Image (cartoon, rainbow, N blue to C red):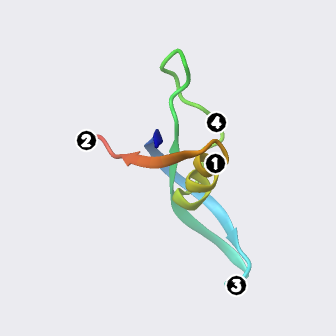
Amino acid sequence: METRTYHYRGQIERWRAGRRSYVWCDGFSAQGSTGGVEYPWMTKQECRAEARLIGARAVFKREG
């Protein structure tokens, strides 16, 4: 199975309906074809869903 690598970019804010408030989450994104950052940054769950759409498995990297 193909893999799609997502790199940690920083904290992002997401709405959580159950909490009825915004929460901070780790943000990840893939690298573009030229090596740059792809936008938007996403949560791990959102990355996994995106990878699944293209028939790949999400892999997460945290440098440093």
Identify which amino acid the numbered label 1 is placed on: Glu
Q: Which residue bears the numbered disc 4?
A: 39
| Residue 61, x across and y down, in percent | 36, 44
* Quarter-of-image position of residue 15: bottom right
Seen from the viewer's position, the closer of residues 5 and 25 is 5
Identify which amino acid the numbered label 3 is placed on: Gly
**Which residue shows up at 70% across the image and 76% down it?**
21
User: Would you call the spot at circle 2 few (<14 residues within 10 Å), some (14-19), or many (20 or more)?
Assistant: few
| Residue 35, x across and y down, in percent | 48, 20
> Is tag 3's residue or tag 4's residue first in the polypeptide sequence?
3
* Foreground tag (1 vs 3): 1
Mark 2 to mark 4 CA distance (whole Å): 21 Å
| In the image: residue 62, left or right of residue 27 | left
Q: Which residue bears the numbered disc 1?
A: 50
Q: Which residue bears the numbered disc 2?
A: 64
> Is tag 4's residue or tag 1's residue first in the polypeptide sequence?
4
SS under mark 3: loop
Identify which amino acid the numbered label 4 is placed on: Tyr
Q: Which residue bears the numbered disc 3?
A: 18
User: Would you call the spot at circle 4 few (<14 residues within 10 Å), some (14-19), or many (20 or more)?
Assistant: few
